[in-house]
Image: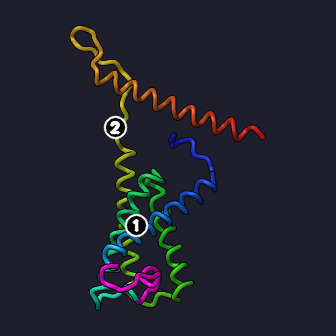
Amino acid sequence: MFYGAMVWDPWLIVSQIVCLQCLYYLTLGLFMFVLVGTRVSRMSLVYFFDYATLTASTVTGWCVISSFLLSAPAGAFYIFYLIERAKKCLDFSATVYIIHLFICIAYGGWPSSITWWVVNGTGLAVMALLGEWLCIRRELREIPILTRYRSSKGICSRLCCGRMINASLLLWRNFWIRFMKYQFHNVS
């Protein structure tokens, strides 16, 4: 993606939010199944959305807390692959947890447990900071320069040629995607 040529695309943003939210709940469900499902006779949405289940006084409560905290790093990796921008990590992380807050309010009322706020605040911080760190690492990666290195005999090394071919194919692919999007948007 060319980072300088960002265009306001609300459909892209909404689709990223929906995809990120679904992946977050799928991951949370997987961790709940593994950690909480072995301890209770029947899994239900109570463990996802009722603030009373996030308690440090029972082993099942600790399993629920662990599920929420393990879902945050997974969410950071989803942000890393779906969003790809460090400056958007906090926005999308906060959106995931704000939507979760609204669903919890609709399901069981205002979360009055301090444990719920601490767990979700920690999850938000972990998701945002880890996602930002991953994206910054990608953004600061060295860009390969398309120059020809010559050996003493004047032959380009295989490594350099392979990188040049890969970089040129990537540039051509990105150009073609942008061109086709431009063509289809300007048809009407």
Q: What label sits on residue 158 in the rendered view?
A: none
Q: Residue at x 44, y 79 (%)?
A: 48
Looking at the image, is 1 positioned above or below residue 131?
Answer: above
Say which residue label 1 marks.
Answer: 27
User: What is the distance, in whole Å, between disc 1 and disc 2 at their CAs?
Assistant: 32 Å
Q: Is residue 20 above or below residue 64?
A: above
Residue at x-position 30% and y-position 15%: 156
| Residue type at the position of mark 1 | Thr
Q: Quadrant of residue 188?
A: top right
In front of the other: 37 or 138: 37
Q: Secondary structure at mark 1?
A: helix
Mark 2 residue type: Glu
Query: In the rendered structure, are the residues bearing label 1 and label 2 in contact, judged by CB atoms less than 8 Å apart?
Result: no
**Residue pictured at 28% horizontal, 11% vertical:** 155
The correct choice, above or below, for 174 with respect to 151 in the image is below
Quarter of the rendering containing residue 58: bottom left
Residue 31 screen position, x and y as percent: 35, 71
Q: Which residue is mark 2?
A: 142
Give how far across and how far down residue 130 sits, in percent. 35, 60
Q: Position of residue 127 (x, y in %)?
A: 39, 65
What residue span does the magenta drawing correspond to? 37-52
